[in-house]
Every structure is written in C-alpha cells, then in structure tokens.
C-alpha cells in the first residue's frame, strides 16, 4: 500500500471514529448537528473523489469507463443532496423541512448506480447489443422517474400534504433500494473473479446503507431521530465502506471480462421495459377512477401519464428501428456466412480431390519407375553397342528423355510425400525450375509458354523445400489461371535478390498496368485469399517471408515471393518489406 493510500485510509478511519465519538459523547444540539453533517459531507466528498480516478484507468470508449462514470455520478448526486441538507442545518441552522426538494436528488442518486450494473462490464458483449440493452434501461428509468413524480410530487406541489408525501416517498425510496440490492445479488451470482469480489463488497455496503436508512426512517416516525444520533453511525460506516471500495477497486483485476458467461438480464430488461410501457394506460385509468384523491392531483396524474406514454412510445419506436437495423445486419451476415460455407465446402472437396490425386500419382510413379529403369538400361546398352552414328544418336536421345522423365517422377514423389518438415539450406532457383517442370504439361494444354530468368549468385534460403515447392506451384498456377483461353500467354518467372531478401516474381503478360505491390495481409488477405492461398501465406510467414501481389478489378495477376536468405546482411531495413524490388544479377532463359 502506498503512502497516499495509507494516509487516505487513516483519514477515513478518523472520520468514522469521530462520528462514533460525537454520537456517543455529545448531547443533542446545534454543535452535534453541525459536526455530524460536516463529517457526513466530508465522507461523501472522499467517496466521490475515490471513484473518479477509476474513470481514467478504464480504456477510452469501453463499457467499464461508462460504468465508472455512472458510479461517480451516483456518488456526486449523493454528495449534492448532503450539501443541500447541510445548507439548512449548518448554514441556516434550522431543521430540514418535511417536504424537502432535495429528496428528489436522494431518490435519483441510485438510478445511475442501477444503470451501471445494467451495463454488465464484467461481460464481453458487442456494442450493438449493449445499445439495445441501454435503451431498455432508459425506458425503465423513465418509468421509474415517472413513478416518483406520479406518487410523490402531487403531495409536494399540487396538493401539499406532509403525511401523504412522507408515506409515499418512503415507500418509493425503499422499493428503489430493494431493486438495487436484487440487482447486486444477481450480478454477484453471474460474475466471476475480481468483478465478483467488487460486486460482493458493494452489495455489503449498500445492504448496510439500506438497513440503516430504514432504521433511521423508523426513528424519524417516532420522533427520536436527530442529526448526529447513534442512528447515523451505520450510515457513516456504509459511506466509508463505499469510499474504500472505490479507492481500491483497481486491485480487484477488473480489466478482464468474462466473455463466456451468458446472462438473461437483457431478456428481462426488454420484458420489464415492455411491461412498463403497457402499465401506463392502466395507471392513467386507475388515477381517473380513484375518487379518494383531490381533483387537482387526479388531473396532474392523468396528464403526466399521457405525456410519459407519448415519450416512452417514441422510445419504443426508436428501439424497434435499432432492432430492425440489427436484424438486417444479422441477415446479411448469415447470408454471407452461408455463401462462404458453400465456397469453403467446394474448396475442401477440391483439396481432397487433389490429395487423392497426389496419393494416386505417388502410387503410379512407383509403377512407372520400373519400365523407365528397363528403358534406361536398354537405351544405355544400345548407346554403347556397335551402331551407326544415326542410330546411336537416337538411343542417346531416348536415354536423355527417360532420365528427364525419371527426374519428373522423382519430383512428383517428393511433392506427394507425407514426410515431416525438414529444414535446410535450399537453392530457390532449383525449386522454381522443378515447379515449372511439374507445371509444364498443364501450361502446354493451356497454350501458355514460360520465360524463366534466374538470378546468378542468389543466396540459399533456410526452408522446407517441399513446402516452398508447393508455394511456387500454387502462385504460378494462380497467375496462369487468370489467363484467357482464347489467346496465348506467357508466364514470366524471375528470381533474384534486392540485397536483403531473396525474391521470386510470377507474372503473366496478358495483364498490364502500373499497380504497385501490396502485402497480402489484413483486409487484402480476407478479400483475395482462397483456402490454398491462405495456406501459402501461412507457410511463407513460417519461413520469415512475405507475399506481395498486384491486382486489377479484383483479379490477382502477379505475385512476389519474398524470403530471407540463410545468411543475412548485418542490417535489414523495413524499406524492402514496404517497397519490394527485384534486382537480377544475371539471367538465363528457358
């Protein structure tokens, strides 16, 4: 505990001890009243000041910050009521009248606290649902203020009656405190961790305040209560308890919300709000049929009910509008989710077909190797035998094509293998050449030619060569898939380095434009990335690299693969990541 916290706690204890001493030792009189009211006001001032720093600790725009704003407002209203009370008993040195205008402030000071509990900052909930819940609570708050005006105000201003005023005020205020206690019991039951401890402490303090307030009202009814009496000691303890709770609230770890908990409070808020609206016509009818009340009170109540009905009806229409907007949003979201689910299902089916094809190719490749081995052996025998030069050349050409076929089959076996990842220094030029050999039959059927420009002295990259082969195959195939089948196209593949990164560029000459490279991440990844492209992005990210792209009319027509070399330079700047560029030292075409 810091020095300030210790000093602040000692001040609170001193104030409580002083209230206890003066209540026991001092006799009823002006001095006791002034001392008690000043102590009471000082405690409320400290309690209000204790809650304000929590507003600054909470994240801006969060529900927890609004929670602390409402709690501080509740304490400030309580303090304002005490200031009005002290004006009569300390400054004017006269008793507070039975019909006191400040009673409305005392009644309203619990409304922000109940609103703070309705926010449920201990739960993670979307702001749209929170707006609907707050609107329901505004409806209930409006009805609650209406009930106070309907029950209490007529006997205060329309037809003054001290007994009716006191009776109705005490009943309404007691009901409000019971509602607050029930809400606190509910949030204590539904919350977890630090929030449960905080709500539990607040429940204890408010239960002490409600019970002591009830006992004080009982003493007032029997004319044995006076300011500074022993009946004020529990009230003083409850305020000090709340002040301590506000001061040390940050120690309860209230920054973590329980997002897994489900609450029925929004449902009940909506139902109670609708019941409050439906109750207004019945209250107007009851006021009209009550012949025991004076005509002026009856007219006031009926007029107030009709005006409140118009106001709350407008709120209901606004709530329905927000609900319609929310339902429309959910409908669009559901439709998009359904379409994405179908697209994902198609991609998964295609991926499964490709996986099955890979297993089939792996099995067939082993069978192909047997006749290839025989063909290679016989072609070598023919080349070494006494043949004419023309026939020997044909035999050597057969041997060369068989060896190329065997290399292609070996690449297929390597690509289709399910072996675990093996990281080593790999030559990116060799990987790109292998990918183009595997793609050659597909590109030839699409009338697509290839132009490969390989940079010399390209440093090796530490990688799983099989995974990088998959990435280069997919990026090249993705670019070629955008080519029009009506006219021939050329796939340009270029490798090189910019000094800090090893680069491979895939582009097609059927597109033109000056679009700049964009990093495949964030919104672009969600917009353009298919299931396979997302896998490529993940693989490249695991290798410490990035994928850039160029697009036109939502169509990707060029990729740039950026990978870190095995041996990096001493300083790697972020500029290469933001502005990728390919520098080829020397090239060779194929």
Image (cartoon, grey):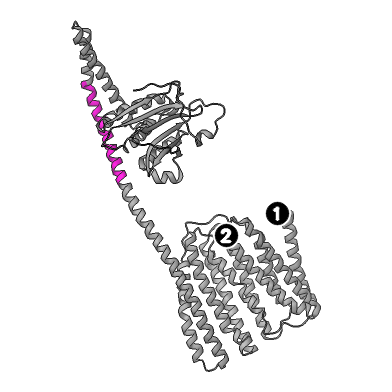
- Residue 48 % position (x, y): 68, 65
Residue occupying the far top of the picture: 386
Q: Nearer the viewer, mark 2 or mark 1?
A: 2
Q: What element carries label 2?
A: helix
Name the residue rendered at 75%, 63% in the picture: 11
Q: Which mark is residue 1?
A: 1
- Residue 117 % position (x, y): 55, 66
Q: Mark 2 points at which residue?
A: 64
Q: From which residue to which does the magenta span run? A: 346-371
Q: Is the magenta stretch mostly helix, strand or loop?
A: helix
Q: Up-down: is 327 above or below 337?
A: below
Q: Is mark 1 on a helix, strand or loop?
A: loop
Answer left or right for 547 relative to 396. right
Quarter of the image for residue 457 reads top left
Q: Which mark is residue 363?
A: none
| Residue 420 visible here | no
Answer left or right for 290 relative to 465. right
- On-image quarter of the N terminus: bottom right
Q: Up-down: is 507 above or below 33?
A: above
Pointer 1: residues within 10 angstroms few (<14), some, or many (20+)?
Answer: few
């Amino acid at each position: 505990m810091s020095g300030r916290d210790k000093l602040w706690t000692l001040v609170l204890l001193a104030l409580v001890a002083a209230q206890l001493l003066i209540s026991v030792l001092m006799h009823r009189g002006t001095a006791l009243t002034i001392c008690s009211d000043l102590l009471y006001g000082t405690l409320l001032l400290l309690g209000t000041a204790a809650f304000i720093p929590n507003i600054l600790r909470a994240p801006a725009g969060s529900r927890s910050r609004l929670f602390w704003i409402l709690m501080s407002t509740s304490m400030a209203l309580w303090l304002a009521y005490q200031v009005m009370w002290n004006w009569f008993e300390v400054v004017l040195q006269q008793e507070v009248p039975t019909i006191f205008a400040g009673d409305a402030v005392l009644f309203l000071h619990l409304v922000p606290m109940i609103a703070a509990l309705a926010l449920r900052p201990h739960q993670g909930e979307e702001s749209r649902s929170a707006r609907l819940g707050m609107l329901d609570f505004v409806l209930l708050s409006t009805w609650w203020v209406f009930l106070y005006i309907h029950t209490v105000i007529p006997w205060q201003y329309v037809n003054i009656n001290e007994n009716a005023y006191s009776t109705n005020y005490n009943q309404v205020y007691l009901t409000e405190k019971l509602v607050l206690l029930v809400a606190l019991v509910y949030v204590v039951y539904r919350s977890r961790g630090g929030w449960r401890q905080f709500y539990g402490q607040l429940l204890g303090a408010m239960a002490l305040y409600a019970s002591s307030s009830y006992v004080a009202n009982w003493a007032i009814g029997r004319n044995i209560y006076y300011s500074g009496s022993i009946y004020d000691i529990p009230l003083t303890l409850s305020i000090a308890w709340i002040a301590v709770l506000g001061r040390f609230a940050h120690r309860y770890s209230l920054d973590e919300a329980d997002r897994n908990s489900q609450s029925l409070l929004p449902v009940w808020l909506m139902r109670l709000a609708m019941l409050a609206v439906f109750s207004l016509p019945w209250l107007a009818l009851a006021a009209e049929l009550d012949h025991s009340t004076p005509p002026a009170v009856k007219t006031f109540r009926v007029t107030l009910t009709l005006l409140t009905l118009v106001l709350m009806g407008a709120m209901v229409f606004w709530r329905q509008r927000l609900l319609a907007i929310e339902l429309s949003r959910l409908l669009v979201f559901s439709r998009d989710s359904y379409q994405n689910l179908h697209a994902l299902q198609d991609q998964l089916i295609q991926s499964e077909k490709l996986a099955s094809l890979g297993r089939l190719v792996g099995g067939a490749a082993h069978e192909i190797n047997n006749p290839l081995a025989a063909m290679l052996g016989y072609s070598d025998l023919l080349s070494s035998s006494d043949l004419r030069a023309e026939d020997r050349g044909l035999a050597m050409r057969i041997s060369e094509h068989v060896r190329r076929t065997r290399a292609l089959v070996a690449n297929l076996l390597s690509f289709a293998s399910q072996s675990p990842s093996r990281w080593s220094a790999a030559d990116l030029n060799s990987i790109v050449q292998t990918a183009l050999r595997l793609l050659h039959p597909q590109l030839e059927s699409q009338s697509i030619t290839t132009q490969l420009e390989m940079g010399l002295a390209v440093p090796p990259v530490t990688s799983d060569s099989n995974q990088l082969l998959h990435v280069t195959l997919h990026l090249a195939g993705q670019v070629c898939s955008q080519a029009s089948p009506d006219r021939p196209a050329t796939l340009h593949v270029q490798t090189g380095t910019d000094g800090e990164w090893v680069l491979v560029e895939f582009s097609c000459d059927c597109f033109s434009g000056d679009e700049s490279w964009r990093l495949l991440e964030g919104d672009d990844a969600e917009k353009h990335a298919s299931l396979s492209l997302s896998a490529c992005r993940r693989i490249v990210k695991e290798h410490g690299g990035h994928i850039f792209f160029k697009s036109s009319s939502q169509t990707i027509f060029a990729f740039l693969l950026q990978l870190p070399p095995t041996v990096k330079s001493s300083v790697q700047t972020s500029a290469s990541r933001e502005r990728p560029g390919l520098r080829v030292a020397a090239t060779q075409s194929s």
